[in-house]
Image (tube, rainbow, N blue to C red):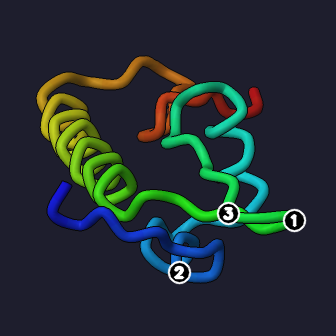
Amino acid sequence: MENDKLIRRRQLLELIGMSHTTQWRLERAGRFPARVRIGAGSVGWHLAEVEEWVRERERVQGGAQQDRGAGTLEAGVTVDGFRGKR
């Protein structure tokens, strides 16, 4: 790996632009790169794996944005696909 560098949580959160809790939930669900134990009570993430995750997320979200604009929404569905209150 070219970027086989470990980053700590603060750098990780700045890079991915989400909260600690959201990142933790994604990791726990297997949808985010796994942490690496550095020492007692100390963890990090491989920078290359995180950068790849960010690129894939941007690619998928970019495609979803284009797909979303192509169709029409049914009544009560917001742009994000969640149903609003009726």
- Near-viewer residue (71 or 11): 11
Badge 1 density bin: few <14, some 14–19, many ≥20, Cα 10 Å = few
**From what the image shows, is residue 51 above or below residue 15?**
above
Residue at image point 73% right, 40% down: 25
Q: Is residue 50 left or right of residue 3?
A: right
Q: Position of residue 24 (x, y in %)?
A: 72, 48
- Near-viewer residue (27 or 78): 27
Q: Amino acid at mark 1?
A: Gly
The residues tagged by marks 3 and 1 sit, at their Cα atoms, a distance apart of 8 Å
Q: Secondary structure at mark 2?
A: helix
Q: Which residue is mark 1?
A: 41
Q: Position of residue 46 (x, y in %)?
A: 43, 58
Q: Is residue 26 left or right of residue 15?
A: right
Q: Position of residue 31 (x, y in %)?
A: 52, 31
Q: Amino acid at mark 3?
A: Ile
Question: Which dot marks residue 11?
Answer: 2
